[in-house]
């Protein structure tokens, strides 16, 4: 059978499950907020959501906000960072993990990742600690919790704050304990593609009453709970979530356990079948991960098994077969134009300086995954085993006929030279 990229029929001719999922409960809760006429951030539905999310993650406090980027920002602001304080971050993550640091006048220090999980390497973190280091932000990438035993021990030993960026990890657990509560604070996103979504939104969880009070105040115009409406104590802003968003999220959280279990079954089926196919590597999970929600599945591509076809051409062929696989980030975060010297915001006090030259920085594992990594999104695994079989069949079809792609690859290279 000819490859679809070269004119054949694709393996998959129907869409995968739609995302996000919704139903009658979301509609009823939205109508209830509508009829209540209390639509804003002080809707009772917001407080109900915060309590439910805190219970889900075993936290004493949960404070909603308008998005996951702001959640990181207010969590960092609650640490009272001073200009020039260093915060260690991974380079394989969305830009907000690092820009939140800069917005709070801190200096992002990039440490390399673990090759299997794409999470911060504890060894790399320890090597990056200096007398100016104030905090570590670890990302639970793809929903796989970072090595929280090692990172928490590092933070305690060096007197550092630990913030968990859990934007991918709703409901994930490490050794039976929900993520988000191992350090100073945890942050989650409810952006449109996240595992629980209201289109946008975010939340901060913490066991510290002091951090919770500061975060709430930053999100609520500098007010204090119990204070007057026109009484403002700190420089805050209006980062509140609306009652409509909270209503949708309350229903979404109820869907999360079933969706997670479904993804887990399908990913394990995929993992088992993939073992008989050469050329794509899916690392085994750390046994300390007791609940993995599989926001993203990262495969590592081995071109020699596919006749030397490069990853991007392999992806074009796989996508033509109806499989919405995609490349990982095009480059590590530090290679973004934002981190060029002329792009970074000026510092008036002279304390902001980075010992890393972001433009020449090269962290090997982070560089490598940008060249050989492939992502499969979470919604692909919300169907049944025949849906997963289509992914496997398409991979095998491209591998079997990869020789026919070599001439196309050579022609493309010649045209560029």
Image (cartoon, rainbow, N blue to C red):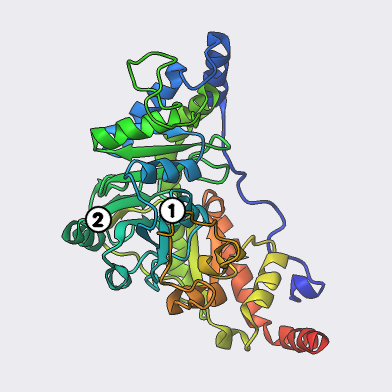
Indicate the quadrant where residue 48 lies: top left
Q: Residue at x 41, y 55 (%)?
A: 106
Residue matched to label 2: 160
Q: Quadrant of residue 120?
A: bottom left
Q: Is residue 135 above or below residue 32?
A: below
Secondary structure found at label 1:
helix
Determine the secondary structure under disc 2: loop
Residue 225's disc is none
Q: Position of residue 287 (x, y in %)?
A: 27, 62
Pointer 1 residue: 101
Seen at 43% across and 32% down, the residue is: 235
Indicate which disc, 1 or 2, sits on the residue closer to the N terminus: 1
In this view, which residue lies farthest toward the left? 157
Residue 144 in sight in this render: no
Image-based side of 297 in relation to 175, left or right:
right
Q: Which residue is depicted at the point 43% across and 67% down?
A: 354
Q: How many marks?
A: 2
Question: What's the distance in space between the residues labelled 1 and 2, CA to CA?
Answer: 15 Å
Q: Residue at x 49, y 56 (%)?
A: 347
Q: Quadrant of the N terminus?
A: bottom right
């Amino acid at each position: 059978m000819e490859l679809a990229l070269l004119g054949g029929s694709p393996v998959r001719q129907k869409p995968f499950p739609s995302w996000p999922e919704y139903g009658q409960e979301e509609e009823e809760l939205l109508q209830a907020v509508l009829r209540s006429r209390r639509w804003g951030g002080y809707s009772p539905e917001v407080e109900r959501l915060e309590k439910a999310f805190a219970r889900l993650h075993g936290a004493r406090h949960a404070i909603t906000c308008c998005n996951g980027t702001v959640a990181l920002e207010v969590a960092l602001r609650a640490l009272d960072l001073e200009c020039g304080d260093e915060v260690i971050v991974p380079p394989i993550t969305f830009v907000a993990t690092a820009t939140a640091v800069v917005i709070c006048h801190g200096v992002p220090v990039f440490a390399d990742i673990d090759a299997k999980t794409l999470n911060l390497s504890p060894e790399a973190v320890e090597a990056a600690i200096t007398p100016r280091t104030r905090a570590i932000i670890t990302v639970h990438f793809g929903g796989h919790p970072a090595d929280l035993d090692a990172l928490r021990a590092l933070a305690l030993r060096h007197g550092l704050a630990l913030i968990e960026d859990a934007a991918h990890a709703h409901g994930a657990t490490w050794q039976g304990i929900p993520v988000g509560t191992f350090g100073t604070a945890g942050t989650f996103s409810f952006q449109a593609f996240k595992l629980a979504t209201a289109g946008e939104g975010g939340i901060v969880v913490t066991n510290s009453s002091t951090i919770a009070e500061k975060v709430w105040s930053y999100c609520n115009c500098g007010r204090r709970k119990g204070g007057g409406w026109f009484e403002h104590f700190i420089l805050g802003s209006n980062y509140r979530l609306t009652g409509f968003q909270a209503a949708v999220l309350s229903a979404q959280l109820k869907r999360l356990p079933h969706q997670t279990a479904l993804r887990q079954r399908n990913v394990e089926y995929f993992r088992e079948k993939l073992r008989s196919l050469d050329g794509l590597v899916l690392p085994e999970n750390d046994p300390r991960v007791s609940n993995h929600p599989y926001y993203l599945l990262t495969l590592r591509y081995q071109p020699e098994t596919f006749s030397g076809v490069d990853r991007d051409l392999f992806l074009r062929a796989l996508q033509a077969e109806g499989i919405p696989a995609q490349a990982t980030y095009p480059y590590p975060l530090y290679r973004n134009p934002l981190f060029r010297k002329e792009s970074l915001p000026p510092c008036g006090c002279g304390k902001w300086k980075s010992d890393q030259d972001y433009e020449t920085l090269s962290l090997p594992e982070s560089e490598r995954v940008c060249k050989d990594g492939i992502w499969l999104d979470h919604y692909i695994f919300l169907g049944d085993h025949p849906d997963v079989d289509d992914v496997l069949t398409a991979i095998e079809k491209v591998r079997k006929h990869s020789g026919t792609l070599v001439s196309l690859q050579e022609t493309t290279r010649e045209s560029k030279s």
